[in-house]
Image (spheres, rainbow, N blue to C red):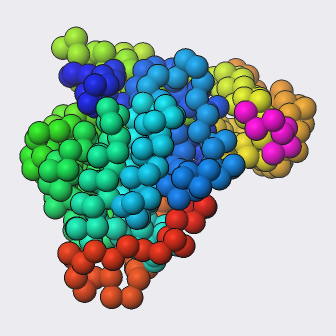
Amino acid sequence: MESLKLGSLEVWPPVVLAPMAGITNAPFRTLCREQGGGLFVCEMITTRALVERNAKTLKMIRFDPSEKPRSIQLYGVDPVTVGRAVRMIAEEDLADHVDLNFGCPVPKVTRRGGGSALPYKRNLLRAILREAVRNAGTLPVTMKMRKGIDDDHLTYLDAGRIAVEEGVSAIALHGRTAVQHYGGTADWQSIARLKEAVSEIPVLGNGDIWSAADAMRMMAETGCDGVVVGRGCLGRPWLFADLAAACENRRDGAGGTDDRESGGELARPTLGQVAATMERHATLLAECFGNEQHAVADFRKHVGWYLKGFTVGADLRRRLATSESLAGLRQGLAELDPAQPWPEGVDAPRGKTHPRDRVHLPAGWLDDPYEVVVPGADAELETSGG
């Protein structure tokens, strides 16, 4: 196992925190970074909002002084606007790495031709990648994508070759189509096929990594150069400690793909340790947002993920998930049994899991895969998911 090389950047271990809207803000990245090394990507930023210097968007680009390398994911549909956004990042030293999002399956994005719908338009994808790389200067540009729209409209191999030809530094593939959303099982073999097709640059695998053992199995089975972890770390920032240990073991020639073999002793915090992390997470959010009520409200979605598998009464769970102040949250956390051990069998799917019936697309989108049609400004909604 080797370090992940992205242009002039070298990342060890070859593990990436996937950008997740409303999740991977500076406080959550801090909790994950403290567990082990890797690349920790901030929330997705829309290119139009960035170049227009939208105040909310600029506040999202917050990095701790110790956060190196600084990584931003951009979402855009217009080659010119994407180029301007990347140039702004490079010239104003806003980050050290730019990732481009072509994997979002959310209907409000795909119905306007964005996200995982966009790579179907091969020449539009090429134009966006060309402008991004041309304006990046020395910054490495990477991309994240899905297999395609559905099994009848797969795009990942064509998109991979286009990326190589346009100078992209690495590709991350989520082994699902847009219509699968987050349902079913990720197709790891598609990651292996992409690695064979674009051996010139690193390929990162994404999808169904719930433990360090899953990450080691993915790398062994597909030959990918690293992994991207999204939903698997929700409520589990210490997963990055397991991943770091597993990668160190593999680099030293030890370890297997079993949970214990992959990295020795795994991080298995007691409920008391989990509660301490929950309190710190909410406190960091309050410091980041400068608004305690907003921070506690934002933290509510994390409560169920942190407590997954633990024995906690329904009333206490409800009170924790509806807390309105740090004091109220701390009072509820103090009622948890601090000695309760880590539950078995919780390294399993969390977050969204259901597939879609169909992918919403612009009228006539599938008629010509080589047509260069730039989606309108409404394709870059401020609330676009990542």
Asked whether 375 falls inside the magenta stretch, the response is: no
On screen, residue 137 above or below 54: above
Q: Is residue 52 visible?
A: yes
Compared with 137, 48 (above or below) is below
Does 215 sit left or right of 190 as displayed?
Answer: right
Instruction: Find residue 311 and report its image quarter.
Output: top right
Horizontal relation, residue 334 to residue 241: left or right: right
Left or right, 44 with respect to 55, comes to left
- Prevailing SS of the magenta stretch: helix
**Relative to 299, does residue 7 appear above or below in the rendering?**
above
Residue situated in front as seen by the camera: 367 or 48: 48
306 up-or-down from 255: above or below = below
Q: Residue at x 67, y 21 (%)?
A: 273
212 sits left or right of 4 in the view: right
Q: Is residue 232 visible?
A: no
Instruction: Identify which residue, 221 or 194, lies in the foreground.
Output: 194
Whether residue 291 appears in magenta in the rendering, the answer is: yes
Percent position of residue 308, x then y: 61, 42
What number of labels is visible?
Answer: 0
Rendered residue at 86%/43% (across/down) = 293
Dividing the image into 4 quarters, which one contains the N terminus?
top left
Could you say where residue 84 lies in the image, as x and y percent from the top left?
44, 51
- The image quadrant that residue 101 belongs to is bottom left
The residues colored magenta run 288-294
